[in-house]
Each structure stands twice: as structure tokens, then as C-alpha cells.
Image (cartoon, grey):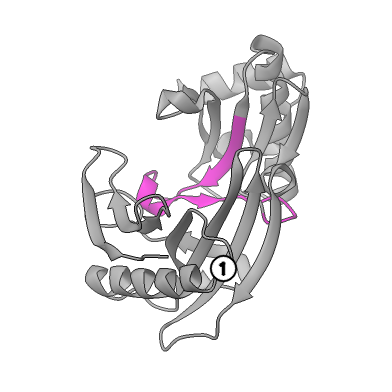
Amino acid sequence: MKRFLCIIICVLAGTAFASIDQIASVKLQESSPAAFSFRILTIYYNKVQPPTDEALKYLHTTLEHYIRLYPDKDIMARSVFSLLGNERDEKPIQNPDGSSYIYYDATSKRITTENQRAEVETKITTKPGKNYAVKYEEKIYPRGRQGTLSVVFHSVPQENEIYRALVQELQKAVTGQNKKIETTAYAFTGNLNDSTNMKQIMGSEGVYIRVEWNPSDGKIIHKNLKNGHVREFGQITE
């Protein structure tokens, strides 16, 4: 049934691709929480990871099909490869500029990559730690500037050690900010210099490991987006 759905979309889009047998499913869903008011289009591959240019061509074609159906809806579109077919194994197929998704803006009628949509400034790159490397970036969105911290482990340690490293590096990044901004630290495995081989680390709760800080209350927290449960890891005061 899933393969049949993919074939229908290809026909409607007017394009056929050699990778059709590799596609597991094509899914369009509302964003969560719904307050973000955009739709998420995901193309899943689970047999063989296709060539990047072929996957991106199919992604654009499928997005254009849904734009014709929903021209007044913002749509975030991405392709992922998952050999095991679950979130823990997902690996995004990235755009040439390193973006993990493309975005259709219904107001401007433009399609841009994640990095084109947000002006990106690499502010700090810290020295590699014993078992990880760190990169800090600031992205400028229409609603304001946000900090993003990528902590990339060479091998996966115990979960409590991952959280300890994220909190430690988040504290360093926030301390170095001239103007305090919302900042989130993410945990990856792989190579910081090769984003195509970076993979987010899934925690025991079934969600990706991350911690975030908001200058409004100064708390460092991890929020489980599935059940809303919040864990606190201390506080950073300005």
C-alpha cells in the first residue's frame, strides 16, 4: 500500500524516479504543537539510501505536488533514510548547504532551505573535548535570534554523561553571549566536520537528547515533546 501511494504521487507530479522501490512511505502531517501552523512532509527511505541529488529532486517534486493541493499552507519538507524504520535510526538526507529540510512559505510563495530561511552565524567553535567536539551557532529567524549548540560525541557514553556534557557546554555558550538569547544544545554522534554523518542521539524516553535555556527564567531544562514532562538541570543567571 505504501509503495502504491508513492507511485500515485509520482504520477500526479509528472515524474518517475529510479529510486521508487527504495521509498517506504510519504507522509504529510500537521506540525506539533499545532500552534506552529505548518505541515510536515516526510519522505522515508528504508532499503538503500538513494543518491542525494535523486532524493532531493524527488523531494522538490513531491513538495510541489502538495503546494498545488494546499497553496495557502506553509510546508516543511524533508527526506530521511532509516534502515530499521524507526526514529532512533533516522538520518536526514541533507541539502548541499547542510540544511536538513526545505520550506515552502505560503505568503511569499517561495521554497528555501533551512539555512536560507534563517540567517546563520557561526559565533564560537570550541576546542574538541575528550570524547566530543562542539560547535555553537546563532540563527536569525523572523521572530528573533536563537542559539544552537551541537555536541558531537565520537562514541556514545552513558545517558547521564551526555546530559552532563550538554549542560556544561550550554553554560559556557550562554556565558559567552553578549546579548542573552534562547539557546538549545543537541547531542549527536559522528564527525563535526562531516554533517552528513552526524546523527542525533535518542534517549531512554524515546525522544532526542537535548537541553534548552531561556533567559526569561534562566532555567536549563529538557522537555519531553511526547508527554510534556520537564526535567530541570540548574539555572544560569545573567
Image quarter hosting the N terminus: top left
| Observer able to see residue 193 | no
The total number of labels drawn is: 1
Q: Which residues are magenta?
A: 76-98
| Residue 80, horizontal then vertical, whole percent | 54, 45
Secondary structure of the residue carrying numbered label 1: strand
For disc 1, the marked residue is: 136
Q: Amino acid at mark 1?
A: Tyr
| Residue 19, horizontal then vertical, whole percent | 65, 39
Q: Residue furthest bottom?
A: 130
Q: Nearer the viewer, residue 126 or 4?
A: 126
| Residue 191, horizontal then vertical, whole percent | 55, 74
Magenta stretch containing residue 86, yes or no?
A: yes
Q: Is residue 216 above or below residue 147?
A: above
| Residue 86, horizontal then vertical, whole percent | 36, 45
Q: Nearer the viewer, residue 145 or 165?
A: 145
Q: Residue furthest top?
A: 69
Q: Is residue 9 above or below residue 123?
A: above
Q: Residue at x 50, y 66 (%)?
A: 150
Magenta stretch containing residue 95, yes or no?
A: yes
Q: Residue at x 62, y 59 (%)?
A: 138
- Left or right: 182 as drawn, with respect to 53: left
Q: Residue furthest front?
A: 238
